[in-house]
Amino acid sequence: MGVMGGTFDPIHHGHLVAASEVQARFDLDEVVFVPTGKPWQKAHSAVSSAEHRYLMTVVATASNPRFTVSRVDIDRGGPTYTIDTLRDLHAQRPDDELFFITGADALAQILSWKDIEELWELGHFIGVTRPGYHLSESGLPQDRVTLQEVPAMAISSTDCRARVADGEPVWYLVPDGVVQYISKYQLYTDDRK
Ligand code: ATP
Ligand code: MG
């Protein structure tokens, strides 16, 4: 089982391509997208409500039979730590092998994550390339981390939010349903919903 954690504010094609590539390479049965509760790294910035981020993730992944969405981080409440995500998923599916997917930027910070030693025991880590970031496994245990090149998608949620705020299009950066969802609920305009 692949695990794709993220703020998904909004989910975009960079997330979806990374998940699809890792699913194919490791022949995973399923990739679970896990929208964060309040991300601890983003404690000081405004993040859209968990329900909006959850629903956009559902909309974006609905057409892929191997993609699902989990509410574990949203329903736990409080700041999200990956160790809790993996513990909860492991408790739900004790027989499944977990492959945690992270972009190059997140992988570079992994040593600062909570309970790092237990993290290595709970799953494999797949670090994927991301434009603008250097993908490296230095300092990380080689038997737990695999690096994977994925098609370069120079897309970030930060840029998508800025585009919407500036009245610029996000078509083809995010799935069509997400474009429509953002517009329907007027996300990323003036007041953060
Ligand atoms: P923000 O700009 O708000 O931080 P983001 O685009 O970085 O948003 P996140 O939800 O923070 O998206 O990222 C979730 C995971 O997806 C992280 O592991 C991140 O590295 C990875 N990721 C995000 N965008 C890409 C991309 N374009 N290519 C590869 N991996 C990505
Ligand atoms: Mg990010």
Image (spheres, rainbow, N blue to C red):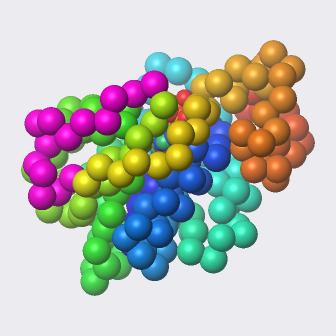
Q: Can residue 185 be seen in this view?
A: no
Question: Left or right: 189 with respect to 66?
Answer: right
- Residue at left offset 70%, top offset 67%: 62
- Relative to 192, say whether 4 is above or below: below
Q: Position of residue 168 (x, y in %)?
A: 84, 22
Q: Give the range drawn in magenta.
A: 132-145
Image-quadrant location for residue 188: top right
Query: Count of labels shown?
Result: 0
Image-quadrant location for residue 48: top right
- Residue at left offset 60%, top offset 26%: 158
Question: Left or right: 192 with respect to 147?
Answer: right
Characterize the magenta stretch by its predominant secondary structure.
loop
Q: Where is residue 105 in the image (x, y as percent from the top left)?
A: 37, 32
Q: Position of residue 130 (x, y in %)?
A: 45, 36
Which of the image's four quarters has the C terminus?
top right
Q: Position of residue 12 (x, y in %)?
A: 65, 44
Is residue 51 within the magenta segment?
no
Is residue 141 within the magenta segment?
yes
Q: Can residue 140 be seen in this view?
A: yes
Which of the image's four quarters has the N terminus?
bottom left
Question: Left or right: 39 with respect to 152?
Answer: left
Question: Left or right: 4 with respect to 53?
Answer: left
- Residue at left offset 61%, top offset 33%: 155
- Relative to 71, say whether 162 is above or below: above
- Relative to 109, say whether 172 is above or below: below
Q: Which of 178 and 153 is in front in this view?
A: 153
